[in-house]
Amino acid sequence: DADVTQTPRNRITKTGKRIMLECSQTKGHDRMYWYRQDPGLGLRLIYYSFDVKDINKGEISDGYSVSRQAQAKFSLSLESAIPNQTALYFCATSDFRAGGYEQYFGPGTRLTVT
Amino acid sequence: TQLLEQSPQFLSIQEGENLTVYCNSSSVFSSLQWYRQEPGEGPVLLVTVVTGGEVKKLKRLTFQFGDARKDSSLHITAAQPGDTGLYLCADDNYGQNFVFGPGTRLSVLP
């Protein structure tokens, strides 16, 4: 079984709808992250969490919110989806190894907002 | 704000050729990771380098970290179609908010 899972894998929604993307991990890592990926722009950080009570905004948090329900679960919500939120979304965990922090990504959620 | 640049942006080569891609930072790296991402999947970690001048090898891939810890290269020997993907470099920013480069998209043709 995958260490980092994301649901759903694909989602089409309409402008103005509220949606939630979910992430679960079995790696036992405290740190979790949400990114979006757009062609030519690489990965941009939306939110990150170091534990259940520690949540931080990333580079592009406007229009998004998160909830860390447990060490293993970190969900991302779009309160009122808009078309420019169409993107590939990734959840990741991180752990300190080999002198630096390393990230482990889920398979991604492809979100389309019409 | 740290900026990572990667070059080239796109690279298309024939199977068996050698290639090098580059990653440059506007500031000193905390530690540098290289990831490979295949279409429809999440990035997968290839290597972490920490010490200036460090060289690491992973089968046909050789990773070099610059002495000043502001640049890195990834060299692939005898590329294979399975090497096709998006190669991303990243700084762990001391475990805070990771910063990623835009990536080099490699296509290896059989």
Image (cartoon, rainbow, N blue to C red):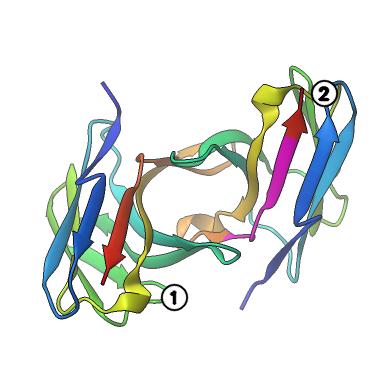
Asked whether, in this view, residue A17 is left or right of residue A38, the answer is left
| Residue type marked 1 | Glu
Q: Overall secondary structure of the magenta stretch?
A: strand
Chain letter of the residue beneath label 2 in the structure image:
B
Q: Residue drawn at (26%, 80%), measured in percent from left and top?
A: A63
Vertically, is B27 above or below A70?
below
Chain where mark 1 sits: A
Q: Nearer the viewer, residue A72 or B37?
A: B37
- Determine if residue A52 is in view: no
* Residue contact between numbered discs 1 and 2, judged by CB atoms under 8 Å: no
Label 2 sits on residue: B15
- Residue occupying image coordinates x 44% and y 41%: B40
Question: Residue A8 placed where, x, y %?
Answer: 19, 46
- What is the quadrant of residue A17 in the picture? bottom left
| Identity of the residue furthest to the top in this view | B59
> To which residue does mark 1 refer?
A59
Highlighted magenta segment, given as a residue range: B100-107
Q: Name which residue lies at 87% across and 36% down.
A: B19
Please say if A113 is above or below A107: below
Q: Is residue B61 above or below residue B39?
A: above
Quadrant of image for the C terminus of chain B? top right
